[in-house]
Amino acid sequence: MNGMESAMAKGTEIGAMKRAAALAAAAALAALLAGCGVSRVAPAPAMLDLGADTAAAPALPARAPIALAPVQGAPQLADTHVVWRVGDDGAPRAYATYRWTAPPPSLVGQRLAERLSRQGPVLGWNVGGALPQLMVTVLRFEQVYAADGSASAGRVGLQAVLVRGRAVLDQVRIERSEPAATQDAPGGAQALRRATDAAADELAGWLAQRIGPAPAAPGMNGAAPVSP
């Protein structure tokens, strides 16, 4: 092999080694990126709820006991997504990084039981069907933005039916809206808390007109109790 052939062979060998090194580096980079993709974990969503029941209750007379059936909800409220939309006619969407601690019907049911119990006992069961029973469905529980995103409100819609046994005594639909202080999920959650409290208080006033007052305790009718 003359000098020229030797140089050409050596150049070919060096080129092959460079190509092999480049391929190895590319493979290592791909493996590194793949590893990063596998190890990357999305952060857990922030959890929201309605907070403590601290708002003042309306001045209403004491009410006879009622039973509150488990609160139901519209199909779109069956999970813990925090729903928002632009305008009343906009398509519902959900925040990617926020969740409710429980489905909205459960949150609303707990708040209703808390606030309605200020006027009288609220039982979770109806022994023998003797008590009037309140059946509530959450129709709406969402944050609604203005078209330009400059403002939003928490909107709650309830359908309540009062029954005794198999007889329907009355029903009512309640819609409440409260403005959000900030245009984000936490601001919407605070607005929904106030709207839920307002809806509960409106429901309490409605019940006060349809259910008799709490029975007087023995000896509390203005006369002294009779001794045996």
Image: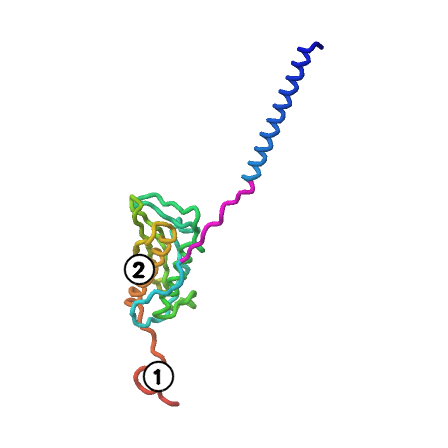
Q: Quadrant of residue 227?
A: bottom left
Q: How packed is label 2: few (under 14 Cα within 10 Å), some, or many (20 or more)?
A: some
- Alpha carbon of mark 2 to alpha carbon of mark 1: how far? 35 Å
Task: Mark yes or no: residue 169 visible.
Answer: no
Give the image location of residue 77, x and y in percent. 40, 51
Give the image location of residue 139, x and y in percent. 35, 53
- Left or right of 88 on screen, residue 31: right
**Residue 199 located within the stretch drawn in magenta:** no
Pointer 2 residue:
171
Mark 1 or mark 2, which is nearer the start of the sequence?
A: 2
130 lies above or below 23:
below
Find the residue positioned furthest to the left: 209
**Range of magenta residues:** 38-49
Find the residue positioned furthest to the top: 2
Identified by mark 1, the residue type is Gly
* In front of the other: 97 or 2: 2
* In front of the other: 147 or 207: 147
- Quadrant assignment for the N terminus: top right
User: Is disc 2 placed on a helix, strand or loop?
Assistant: strand
Q: Residue at x 32, y 57 (%)?
A: 195
- Left or right of 133 on screen, residue 33: right
Of labels 2 and 1, the one closer to you: 1
- Left or right of 96 on screen, residue 158: left
Pointer 1 residue:
219
